[in-house]
Amino acid sequence: MKIDGVASRTIWLQPDGWSVGILDQTMLPHTIVRHTLRTIEDAAHAIKSMQVRGAPLIGVTAAYGVALAMRSDPSDAALKQALGFLAEQRPTAVNLRWALNDLEITLAPLAPKARAAAAYARAGEIAEDDVETCRSIGAHGLRLIRELARDKSGEPVNILTHCNAGWLACVDWGTATSPIYQAHDSGILVHVWVDETRPRCQGSALTAFELAQHGVPYTLIADNAGGHFMQRDCVDMVIVGTDRVTACGDVANKIGTYLKALAAYDNGVPFYVALPYSTIDWSIERGTDIPIEERGADEVLRVQGRLPDGAVASVAISADGTPVRNPAFDVTPAKLVTGFITERGICEASRDGLLSLYPERKSAAA
Ligand SMILES: CSC[C@H]1O[C@H](OP(=O)(O)O)[C@H](O)[C@@H]1O
């Protein structure tokens, strides 16, 4: 996608052929800052600090983190240490484990001297696969939006989304936003209700930013307003992303998603989850088995913003010493999900639904 009219991605291999560039998402929307990752520690910090975030992008960053580690020390011990170190950075998005498993399978059989080049090649393949996968998610999701548009008599299709499952959560296109971009680009009138998504405000800081850059009409709303707009027939569908879907269709996503799913269910609003194959965790069935990341208190106690003089600052919004819990994700049970939008098509949120699109998994899922 584009930033100020210039084609941009969230992560890229630098011209030197080994260091890795990233867009620092903790500085958006106020400033565009790009960093260079030169070590596995840089990659781990980028994931942990949420300079890069979003399940697919976390996976790609981890893959390049392994490549950086292999450039430094390709030994068996170093490979094992690198995989374990990166896996510790964030627990919920299954793409992190998926990518690390992929790199382990790719690199373990190789002679150490061959590992760095193979790791960079595989990380690049994973990144390019993510671009095509997200484009395909958009093509399938476009069909749903086009069907809704038929009944709108020239009015926009109103879509609510939560957090950021946009191109900033991936390498390009996004998951939840890809159908929106493709509908907009094909001339279908769309409007997006953007949940601000406290406490990290990925909606107000990231989704609003990328939709504005693409010229997609949107309205930023408080997280607590979504149910009200659904009740007033202002929402035609909900599309969110996900960090992990179980083999039976339960969905882990940014905290607050479950509440939106309840409001959608109560108001008969279609609730879709967009995801790539790499976000399906075939090893677990129940959403309650998904590890939920607990993040620091300051994310709730403080907000970052731009001062009148343009400087970006963090300010406290609660009294010092306020006790905080900060779960970063929640789990939406499959029964509240209308369907999944994947790179292979659309299916119901169930084991059978997922296996209808991924039949090669039937033996493993038995
Ligand atoms: C396409 S994955 C997007 C997914 O990841 C976000 O979490 P975070 O910003 O903490 O990495 C959020 O759950 C999005 O739906």
Image (cartoon, helix red, strand yellow):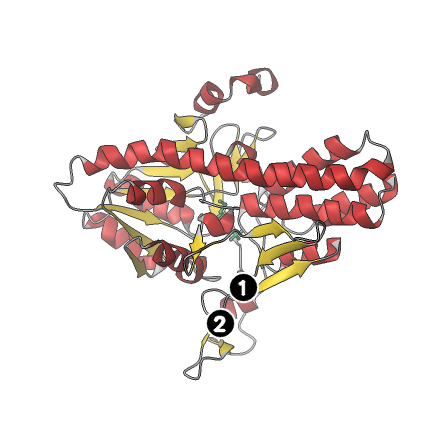
Marks 1 and 2: in contact by CB < 8 Å? yes
Q: Position of residue 167 (x, y in %)?
A: 46, 48
Q: Position of residue 207 (x, y in %)?
A: 40, 55
Residue 346: in sight, yes or no? yes
Would you call the spot at circle 2 few (<14 residues within 10 Å), some (14-19), or many (20 or more)? some
Q: Position of residue 50 (x, y in %)?
A: 58, 58
Name the residue beneath numbered marker 2. Answer: 304
Above/below status of 109 relative to 97: above
> Residue 198, which numbered label?
none
Q: Position of residue 31 (x, y in %)?
A: 49, 69
Left or right of 282: which side holds 85?
right
Residue 94: in sight, yes or no? no
Which structural element holds mark 1? loop
Name the residue beneath numbered marker 1. Answer: 26
Above/below status of 160 relative to 276: below
Disc 2 from disc 1: Cα separation: 9 Å
Viewer-nearest of discs 2 and 1: 1
Residue reaching furthest front? 15
Residue at screen point 66% across, 60% down: 36
Residue at screen point 39% across, 37% down: 138
Specify whether tag 2 is near ligand 1 (CB below 8 Å).
no
Q: Which residue occupies the foreground of this view, 54 or 71?
A: 71
The mark total stands at 2
Left or right of 162: which side holds 243?
right
Residue reaching furthest bottom? 309
Indicate the amino acid at tag 1: Thr
Above/below status of 357 relative to 170: above
Indicate the amino acid at tag 2: Gln
Left or right of 20: which side holds 266?
left
Point out the tag, 2 or 1, that comes first from the N-terminus. 1
